[in-house]
Image (cartoon, helix red, strand yellow):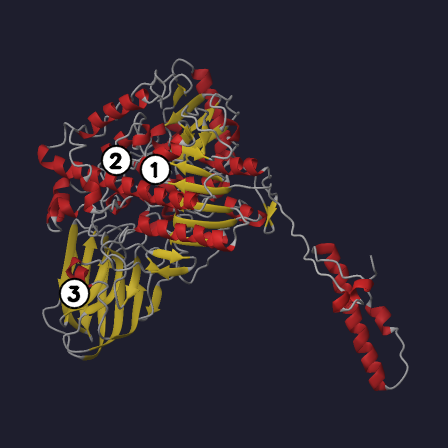
Amino acid sequence: MEEFYSLEKISNLKFNGSFRNKGCSIFLLLVLIIISNIKIYAQDVLPFPPVPSASIANETLAESTHKRRAQPDHLPKDAPNIIIILMDDLGFGTPSTFGGGVNTPTLTKVFKEGIAYNEFHTTSICSPSRAALLTGRNHTHVGNGTIAERAVDWDGYTGIIPKEAATVAEVLKDYGYSTSAFGKWHNTPANQTTVAGPFDYWPVNYGFQHFYGFLAGETSQYEPRLINDFTPVEPPKDEKYHLTTDLADHAIEWMNQHKSYAADKPFLLYFAPGAGHAPHHIFKEWADKYKGKFDDGWDAYREKVFKRQKELGWIPKNAMLTARDKTMASWESIPKSERAFQIRMMEVFAGYVEHADHEVGRVLDALEANGQKDNTIVFFIWGDNGSSAEGQNGSISELLAQNGVSNTIQQQLDALNKLGGLDAIGGPLLENNYHAAWAWAGNTPFKHTKLVASHFGGTQNAMVVRWPKMIKPDNTPRSQFHHINDVVPTIYDILNIKAPKVVNGFEQMPIDGVSFKYTFNDAKAKEVSKVQFFDNNGSRGVYKDGWYACTFGPLYPWIPAQKGLAEWDSTKDVWELYNIKEDYTQFNDLASKNPQKLKELQEVFNEEAKKNKDYPIGAGIWLRIHPEDVIKAPYTSWTFDETTKRMPEFSAPGLGKKSNKVVADVEIKENASGVLYALGGSGGGVTLFMDNGKLVYEYNMLIIERYNVESSAKVPAGKHKIEVLTTIAKPGALAEIVISVDGKEYAKGEVKRTVPVAFTASETFDVGEDLGGPVSIRYYKKAPFKFDGKINSVKVDLL
């Protein structure tokens, strides 16, 4: 290596001639020194191309030949395209492909052209499953022990995938893949989703070169809160618009453009529609296809599906149908006056899911039309967890469960009748989710539902894999025990690459998953050795060598406003033991017959929990006990103006949840109308608007209750300061509302109970209009009901 010039050597150089010549000589020498040192450093650090030789440098252009340098190829020849399809909140017993009651022709087609797995597992909840899928690590290992909205500051529950756990998109992008994601993300901290960022944990900074979808855990299918890379997007005001169709359109467009612009590169496409997560939104004609199909209720549904699953060979012949939990309602216990409501909820869900299956089919048809089907591997994962019991007794507002708000079916029906009755279910005015027992039925033949990690109703999901070039179609189920964290190492195995040790300067943590490539062309291949732990909301379990130990924990997702969570002691939980290879459905508890094996597995669980940052056990329950600790902005005072739009609720002021004072500095005309500010959407929120000169404050308490405080007098034209003072003693308590104009009281009233945690998962705070779903039904047809005056400022102070 050439030697760096030192300051001492430079100072000892001697020059002849005039001062000017000396100056020029020194200048030229310094330039040479800098160039030389840059060259030396670069050769040590960066792979710069070599400097042309003297002979080439001296050639004339006419004498020269030109040939571009060969670009390195880090992938095997003819590397496949990769499509990962992840459905949402869909249980093992829902698709008709495998005996369920929801028509799924696309899933069936992919299965007939590929293979399927009937012992594939997830984490029992959204964000954790997605983090495990994208990184190949266990959910708590990468900070996702619970959903992003319930994140707390324990290492395994921060809601942040660390950069030390690079996603498959980041790795494949560096290897030369084009990457994209469409649909639900749900892996960005809930208070970091504003247009101000930070954007470190958004999809495009996790390796996806393009993202189109929503960041939160759920959104309206008619008025979604969309993001295009980093930019908020408003969907068209079109009664034929549906989010799943929109996502499919964008995915197809991206694939077509990729073929046109970068046909020599393989691609990774992650397609994650919101279906069938609540709100269950679908057009009436899709739901009507199921009229009469669920009239005999959920208990009968399970019996029929279980029978078909066996006939299809999808589950073992010796499998036993597990019983309904004693705390969950039987169909016979549902009053006849309420059954039409419960049946329609399931019809809407089924139509919603079939529609999503159809849209996935459009994406795969476009792939085939492009001539890319043969060398594209498709991972079609039927759910990020089991079907969801968060509808509890049946709900027209899905966030009732998340807030632990008690309610009755009669309250639901009374509110529903004001919005159009049964025909309104599935429409934009509601945030509906079906009865928890329909979810239990959708998880046939297993026990329990989403949010329960101990039993397979929450964690076992069907998966279909298709790769025409390399996988021979075979309808024999793959029964090797695998997990969603195994998808990434399988992809690396297919490409014959190793998980990198360093990505973007971050030393990488080890991969937890294992490859299941060995099963592709051998249905009976010996199961690879794998230890897999599960934990969600204190329900937990561990699998090893065909044995599974588990305990249910404290949380019953289907019980509204459950009491006693704060008194739970995890050390007193009763554990169960199952031999999964002989008892497919966890029917026979062997804990009392084999206490030594149970103790052995409990020790394995403790080791895995410690290694994967799972402690404290049950951390995901914290916010159910302490809603005051929910993720929120660090501020107590804000000043907004008319440019304030699309501020996500978890970053916005806690209007409707905490005592606050809002002062709007406005200029209005005679008989002014329009929204001054709004937080939330159709499912719940707070809005202050003017209607023909009068001030109206509405508190939409998750649809089942609406409170209005309205001025009797009109506000005259001119400049005014409008103040809304809200007093709330504690989360969920009564709120007192006082509205004043220029210091004079105009109206006052009260809200009998308030929302303790959140109105919505993805709706926003807006000034001057109400974007997304409108909070108030009074201006639904006029939405976004833009204010026709001028708003100079809106100042908010939490008190």
- For label 1, count other residues whose C-alpha is less than 10 Å away and answer few (under 14), some (14-19) or many (20+): many
What amino acid type is highlighted by mark number 2? Trp
- For label 2, count other residues whose C-alpha is less than 10 Å away and answer few (under 14), some (14-19) or many (20+): many
Q: Tell me the CA gap for discs 2 and 1.
A: 31 Å
Q: Between tags 2 and 1, which lies in front? A: 1
Contact (Cβ within 8 Å) of mark 2 with mark 1: no
Q: 66 above or below 393? A: below
Q: Give whichever of discs 3 and 1 has the lower sequence position.
A: 1
Q: Position of residue 482 (x, y in %)?
A: 46, 29
Q: Position of residue 119 (x, y in %)?
A: 41, 27
Contact (Cβ within 8 Å) of mark 3 with mark 2: no
Q: Position of residue 607 (x, y in %)?
A: 51, 30
- On the rendered image, what quadrant is the C terminus found in? bottom left
Callout 2: SS: loop
Q: Which mark is residue 106?
A: 1
Callout 3: SS: strand
What amino acid type is highlighted by mark number 3? Val
What amino acid type is highlighted by mark number 1? Thr
Give the labeled residue for mark 3: 696
Give the labeled residue for mark 2: 558
Q: Is residue 505 visible?
A: yes
The residue at the point 74 percent across, 59 percent down is 41
Please tell me which residue lies in front, 131 or 209: 209
Q: Give whichever of discs 2 and 1 has the lower sequence position.
A: 1
95 relative position to 750: left or right: right
Q: Give whichever of discs 3 and 2 has the lower sequence position.
A: 2
22 relative position to 213: left or right: right
Q: Tell me the CA gap for discs 3 and 2.
A: 36 Å
Q: Position of residue 59 (x, y in %)?
A: 79, 66
Q: 22 above or below 124? A: below
